[in-house]
């Protein structure tokens, strides 16, 4: 009987560390499963999006490749336009006149150009109206 008690004690002592280990609570394990399910769902949605978007992206890439020569041809002209216009915030929105003309008004005044010769005197004031000729007509 003494051996049986000793054997039972040894068995309990051997299994005690296994019982002392933490086992995840069922709620915590369910939360981990929930997050992994959400991750899987997001992955599936993204794969579906990429599958749907891939043909459109390929088509857009091809269209841009087809436009490349025209864009390269317009590049220098566009640079000239940007140099002439300067800052687009100096202009109001385009207006379409009844006759079909489109005008874009400058909101900020254009700075006066510097004379080529700093000692030169301007012929007339820039805001002065043009002088009429002998017939009274004004040349515009």
Image (cartoon, rainbow, N blue to C red):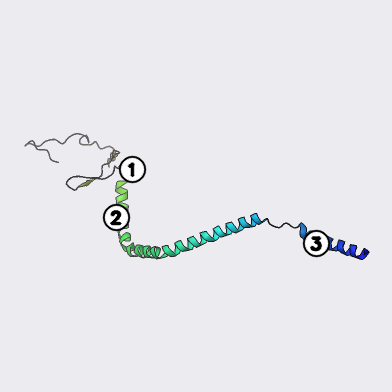
Kindly identify the residue that appears in the image at 30 percent across and 46 percent down: 85
Percent coordinates x, y for residue 84 in the rendering: 29, 48
Badge 2 density bin: few <14, some 14–19, many ≥20, Cα 10 Å? few
Sequence-wise first label, 1 or 2? 2
C-beta proximity under 8 Å, tags 1 and 2 = no
- Label of residue 89 in the image: 1
Give the CA distance from mark 3 to mark 2: 85 Å
In 3D space, how far apart are the residues under numbered discs 3 and 1 (Cα atoms)?
A: 80 Å
Q: Are marks 3 and 2 in contact (CB under 8 Å)?
A: no
- Depth check: 133 or 28 in front? 28
Q: Earlier in the sequence, mark 3 or mark 2?
A: 3
Tag 3 secondary structure? helix
Q: Residue at x 33, y 65 (%)?
A: 66
Q: Which residue is mark 3?
A: 15
Estimate the x, y position of residue 64 in percent, counting from the top left.
Answer: 35, 62
- Label 1 to label 2: alpha-carbon separation: 20 Å
Q: Earlier in the sequence, mark 3 or mark 1?
A: 3
Residue, far front? 1
Determine the image quadrant of residue 25.
bottom right
Is residue 76 rendered to the left or right of residue 28?
Answer: left
Q: Quadrant of the C terminus?
A: top left
Query: Residue 77 shows which numbered tag?
Result: 2
Residue 115 in the image, given as x and y percentages of width and height: 27, 40
Determine the image quadrant of residue 126: top left
Q: Nearer the viewer, residue 70 or 134?
A: 70
Percent of width and height locating residue 45: 48, 60
Secondary structure under badge 2?
Answer: helix
Other-residue count near label 1 (Cα within 10 Å), few / some / many at <14 / 14–19 / ≥20: few
């Amino acid at each position: 009987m003494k051996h049986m008690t000793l054997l039972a004690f040894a068995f309990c002592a051997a299994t005690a560390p296994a019982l002392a280990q933490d086992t995840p609570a069922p709620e915590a394990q369910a939360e981990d499963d929930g997050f992994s399910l959400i991750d899987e769902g997001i992955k599936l949605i993204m794969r579906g999006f990429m599958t749907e978007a891939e043909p459109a992206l390929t088509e857009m890439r091809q269209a841009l490749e087809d436009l490349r020569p025209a864009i390269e041809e317009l590049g220098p002209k566009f640079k000239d336009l940007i140099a002439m216009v300067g800052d687009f915030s100096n202009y109001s929105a385009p207006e379409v006149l009844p006759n079909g003309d489109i005008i874009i008004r400058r909101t900020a005044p254009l700075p006066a150009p510097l004379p080529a010769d700093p000692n030169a005197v301007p012929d007339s004031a820039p805001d002065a109206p043009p002088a009429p000729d002998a017939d009274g007509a004004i040349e515009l």
